[in-house]
Image (cartoon, grey):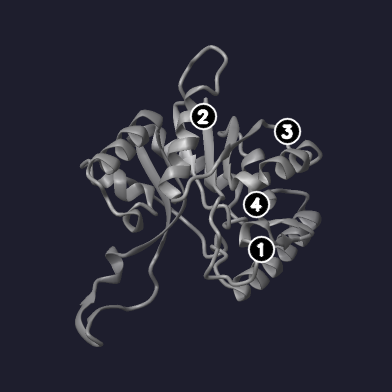
Amino acid sequence: MNVAIIPAAGSGSRFGGETPKQFLLMGGVPVLLQTLRRFDLCSEIDGTIVALPEAALESWRELLATSGLEKPVRLVPGGRERSDSIRNALEAAAHWSPDGQLPEIVAVHDAVRPLVTPAQIALVVQRAREVGAAILALASTDTLKEVENGLIVQTLDRRRIYRAQTPQAFRYSLLVRANQAARESNLPSAATTDDALLVEALGVPVAIVEGSSHNLKITTPEDLRLAERLLQEEVASRRSSNEYA
């Protein structure tokens, strides 16, 4: 059994406005629901756990009841920090199966990356099954500079630089251990926004699966407009080819 975890309790302050960006409309439905549809269509995912603000739990239970999603979605209260939401979701995942069986692989994904494809999700899960941990990442195409006090310190070799995306998938026991170690070491919350980092801290190798520029993270209003255009193009392409890549 493989479970997706989507932390969606953040305020999205960088986006601006009163509504958190994961609840804004994209293609006529909330961004978060667009994201959930991708996991619902992935053969490697058996169900999804979403961490939400306490005040949003009831309305989302009602929305999901008529969403058309085929696989189970469990809602849990989010925490003050992202790491708290992940911990709540991991605890819920431990009790997901009626027979008490723990998940094999857990795939953590940003609520505001709604254009990831089911195929990409599957590849990351499969790679995590092989090596224990894997993330979707995009090779850098820019020349990167390390800067201090407004001055270049060095030029980095872009052939060795990747931009981390999600999903990030791990063996369940490994991610639980990594989160426990982070709490015991009092790691600052700012350093726990990337789950792979916690696993790396244990000395465990993390594999890379090639990502896509379309798998963008909605951070600004411009990102949302771009995501809308990409979704429209994707829908038009699917209609003409009768496929879902």
Q: Is residue 18 above or below residue 142?
A: above
Foreground residue among 31 and 207: 31
Cα distance, mark 3 to mark 2? Answer: 20 Å
Q: Is residue 13 above or below residue 222?
A: above
Cα distance, mark 4 to mark 3? Answer: 16 Å
Q: Which residue is label 4 attached to?
A: 32
Q: Nearer the viewer, mark 4 or mark 1?
A: 1
Q: Earlier in the sequence, mark 2 or mark 1?
A: 1
Q: Position of residue 45 (x, y in %)?
A: 57, 34
Cα distance, mark 3 to mark 1? Answer: 27 Å
Q: Nearer the viewer, mark 3 or mark 2?
A: 2
Judged from the image, the secondary structure of the residue bearing numbered disc 4 is: helix
Judged from the image, the secondary structure of the residue bearing numbered disc 2 is: helix
On residue 194, which mark appears? Answer: none
Q: Position of residue 81 (x, y in %)?
A: 44, 51
Q: Is residue 125 above or below residue 153?
A: above
Residue contact between numbered discs 4 and 1, judged by CB atoms under 8 Å: no
Q: Earlier in the sequence, mark 4 or mark 1?
A: 1
What residue occupies the far left of the structure in this picture? 153
Q: Earlier in the sequence, mark 4 or mark 3?
A: 4
What residue occupies the far front of the structure in this picture? 55
* Mark 1: amino acid: Thr
The residue at 27%/50% (across/down) is 187
Query: How dense is the environment of label 3, judged by Cα within 10 Å: few (below 14), some, or many (20 and up)?
Result: few
* Mark 2: amino acid: Ala
On residue 19, which mark appears? Answer: 1
Q: Earlier in the sequence, mark 3 or mark 2?
A: 3
Cα distance, mark 4 to mark 1? Answer: 13 Å
Q: Which residue is label 2 attached to?
A: 92
